[in-house]
Image (spheres, grey):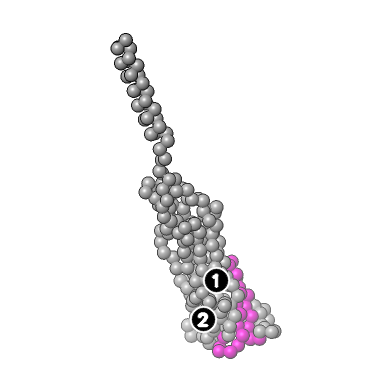
Amino acid sequence: MKFFYLKTLLILSAFALFLSCGLTDDDEDTVMSPSLTYPSTNLMATFFEAGNSEAPTISWNGNQGTLSLSSSIEGISLNSTNGVLNWNRQLAPGDYNMNVIATNSEGQTVANINLSNPFQGAFTGTYSGSFYFMFEFNSDGTLEVAADDGINPLVGSGTWELNNGVLTADYTYDSSNDEFSISGTLSQTNNQAELSGNWYFGFGAQDGNEGGEFEIFID
């Protein structure tokens, strides 16, 4: 009888230990590195317009962590609460590649984002101090130009390039075959984008062919 009792006690103890181990393994919350998914990782901005991405889906998997950008880019910021990327009017034209990083105690997950901000827009101002001057730059590298009279201007077309903040353009007016060009520096604030420099006789913005200065703006 005593042997039977001891045997039963051992079996019950072993069974209880098995259940205890099973509950610990199955019921304990498991903490893992976070997951981070954006609806789109290829974003398109409009030059000199503020914008933002869609909010990502974030799962912290048992441990609330932090969101951060891998590098600092002027004009781009990250909402560290919901993961939305924001850009302002100071974002320079170009293509940007960045990583959004979700980090918790168990590790990190990286979302790679590409943002394209092609140069484009209609700039209006003056050349040679007083004459009307308007350039509409298209994102495909072409342009339309209007000059002299804002109501009944000379109109023409051409092409442009932007390198390291310096824009050069060649153009002709529809009413003649005369060739002209400009070379100017692009600057931006949240209130205004400005192109300023010189206009030239002939293509190529060659030194010695300057015709005068110009200033054109987007407000």
- Asked whether residue 125 is drawn in magenta, I would say no
Labelled disc at residue 57: none
* The residue stretch that appears in magenta: 127-149
Q: What residue lies at 42% left-to-right and 51% top-to-bottom?
A: 64
Report the residue at 33% width, 19% height from top.
9
Does residue 135 show up magenta in the picture? yes
Any part of residue 108 in sight: no
Left or right relative to 121: residue 16: left
- Residue 77 lies, in percent from the top left, at 46, 64
Where is mark 2, residue-wise? Answer: 196
**Residue sitting at 58 percent across and 85 percent down?**
126
Residue 48 is tagged as 1
Instruction: Name the dominant secondary structure of the magenta segment.
Output: strand
Mark nearest the camera among 2 and 1 is: 1
Q: Position of residue 96 (x, y in %)?
A: 47, 62
Q: Amino acid at mark 2?
A: Ser
Rate crowding at label 1 as few (under 14), some (14 to 19) or many (20 or more) other CA atoms within 10 Å: many
For the question of whether residue 110 can be seen, the reply is yes
Could you give the CA–CA distance between mark 2 and mark 1, rounded to whole angstroms? 17 Å
Q: Quarter holding the C terminus?
A: bottom right
Image spot of residue 176 (x, y percent): 66, 81
Between 177 and 164, the one lying in front of the other is 164
Q: Earlier in the sequence, mark 2 or mark 1?
A: 1
Residue 18 occupies which quadrant of the picture?
A: top left
> Of 113 and 214, which appears nearest the observer?
113
Q: The disc labelled 1 sits on which kind of residue?
A: Phe
User: Quick one: 62 or 202, which is closer to the camera?
Assistant: 62
